[in-house]
Image: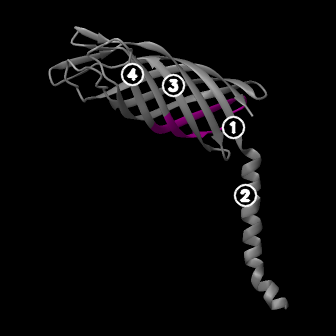
Amino acid sequence: MMRRLLSQLPVALCFFAFGGLFVTGSARAQTDAAASLYGSFSGTTAANGTVQSPSNAAGVLLELRHISNPLVGYELNYSFNRANQNYNDFEEIKTAAHEVGADWFVSFPVLMLKPFILAGGGIIFFHPDSGQPDSKSDAKPVFVYGAGVDWTVIPHIGLRFQYRGNLYHAPDVSHAFSSTNAFTHTAEPMIGAYLRF
């Protein structure tokens, strides 16, 4: 009987060790919702006889972020901004850009601040405004990277300062001009606020 109990001891110890890690990790888990305003600054692309220049614009980012342990977490996000496309300085197609994505991030607390870095991906949907006969919708996969800092102002509420970069193929929203099909980059400096549950 005693020998049987001793043989089960390592299994029981492992069970309690992993259980303790799970409880410790759960106690530190945090979820927050955030809203940010940003500037969208995109580069010009040129290929296939087309020069494509996106307009700079303001946008809104919504985030739902979960930290499952002290350092690593993930987030789901949605953003919207105007993304008017100018072709060869001749035709401008008024366009809206909707982006949905998911990111992994690493963060660590330093006093009232929590710096973080992130990387992930998603899809940008480009929808021209109605009433533009030479236009069409397009969707592009996007790689997202960034860094920032959360500043706790009062418990559960704070400010979020961050920079995000988007890397993707230039959208093809014109019937009249060939797509550049070239990689482009959008820089998005932003400021927002979060509510931590």
Mark 1 and 3 residues: CB-CB less than 8 Å, in contact? no
Q: Is 109 covered by the magenta stretch?
A: yes
The correct choice, above or below, for 164 with respect to 30 in the image is above
N-terminal of the two: label 2 or label 1? 2
Tell me the CA gap for discs 1 and 3.
19 Å
Mark closer to the observer (1, 3): 3
Residue highlighted by disc 4: 127
Where residue 151 appears, x then y in whole percent? 68, 25
- Prevailing SS of the magenta stretch: strand
Q: Which label lies toward us, 2 or 1?
A: 1
Question: Where does the image place residue 141, in percent across and percent down from the top left?
Answer: 38, 36
Residue, disc 2? 21
Image point (55%, 32%), residue name: 77
Quarter holding residue 87: top left
Q: Secondary structure at mark 2?
A: helix
Disc 1 residue crowd, few under 14, some 14–19, many 20+, Cα 10 Å:
some
In percent of the image, x 36 and y 14: which residue is there?
A: 84
Q: Which residues are magenta?
A: 101-121
Upstream in sequence: badge 2 or badge 3: 2
**Location of mark 3 (residue):** 79
Of the numbered discs 4 and 1, the one sitting upstream in the chain is 1
State the CA–CA distance, disc 2 to disc 1: 19 Å
Residue of label 1? 31
Q: Secondary structure at mark 4?
A: strand
The picture quadrant where one finds residue 21 is: bottom right
